[in-house]
Amino acid sequence: RKARVLGSATICLVALHPSKPELIAANIGDSGFMLLRPAHTASPRLGTLGVAAQGAAPSSPEADGQARYSVAFRSPQQLRSFNAPFQLGLAPDSPEEGGDDRFETPQDAALVRVPIEEGDVVVLATDGLFDNVGEEEVIAVVEASEGEGAQQLATRLAHRAQELSLAREVDSPFAVLAKENDILWGGGRPDDITVVAFRVAQRGAAGSTAVPLASGPGALPESTRLGLESSGRGDAAAREGWDIGFTERAAEANWD
């Protein structure tokens, strides 16, 4: 039964395809996710449905100062205007039936599909992270967390965002955009911060808490078997009982 819950929120939903090495997402507003890839395997920066993002130059170790990770994909923001993101919501005077022009609907979500690879790091967050922490800083935190679990990574990112939100000596990404919109703003932007992080890994890797993206009893589905054989993984295709692709358990950190 539907309940009339007053309020509004941005939404970022991310799932892993049950049988393909692919991330699927639906995003409304200025929350979002960032896909980081080890630089030695980095492909050109991806856009929606795997198409090269228009106007986005490929990230490279050279461009990132020999960073060990590069940004393979970043979800697009949806804004009505500066600092006015798309939101799902319900106001006290919203009609019982029909839409409310002050809010968006699930049909307004930006839908993306992005290929993933072993070693990728995915960071989902509210704008409290992305408004205060630039891409280079996110990469630096991910590199400093190398060898740690997803929980430690999410916590590091949330704490760093909280620190920078209170800083006044360096302009945050939010401050840069504000000035581009003729709004005088300096330093960080205090806000609620939620971060979810996970690493894509093979099951059985040392220290991994990986869980299968897709599994099943009996013989492997024919389409999946052919895909494994074509990629040189015929040994996996021949097994009775199957599992395809793994991801480390996601971890969440919050900071108010």
Image (cartoon, rainbow, N blue to C red):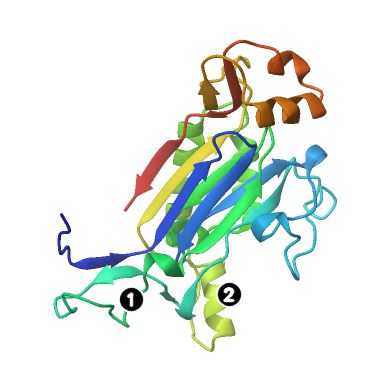
| Mark 2 or mark 1, earlier in chain | 1
At mark 1, the secondary structure is loop
Q: Position of residue 156 (x, y in %)?
A: 49, 41
**Residue at image mark 1:** 103
With respect to residue 78, does 210 lie above or below? above
- Pick the residue in front: 124 or 253: 124
Q: Position of residue 127 (x, y in %)?
A: 45, 61
Q: Amino acid at mark 1?
A: Phe
Residue extending farthest to the top is: 240
Q: Is residue 201 left or right of residue 227?
A: left
Residue hosting label 2 = 176
Q: Nearer the viewer, residue 73 or 50?
A: 50
Number of dots carrying numbers: 2
On screen, 87 above or below 210?
below
For this orientation, the residue located farthest to the right is 62
The answer to whether the residues at label 2 and label 1 have Cβ atoms under 8 Å apart is no
Residue lying farthest bottom?
A: 182
Circle 2 Cα neighbour tier, 10 Å, few/some/many (<14 / 14–19 / ≥20)? some
In the rendered structure, the answer to whether residue 234 lies left or right of residue 15 reads: right
Circle 2 SS class: helix
- Residues packed near mark 1 inside 10 Å, few (<14), some (14 to 19) or many (20 plus): some
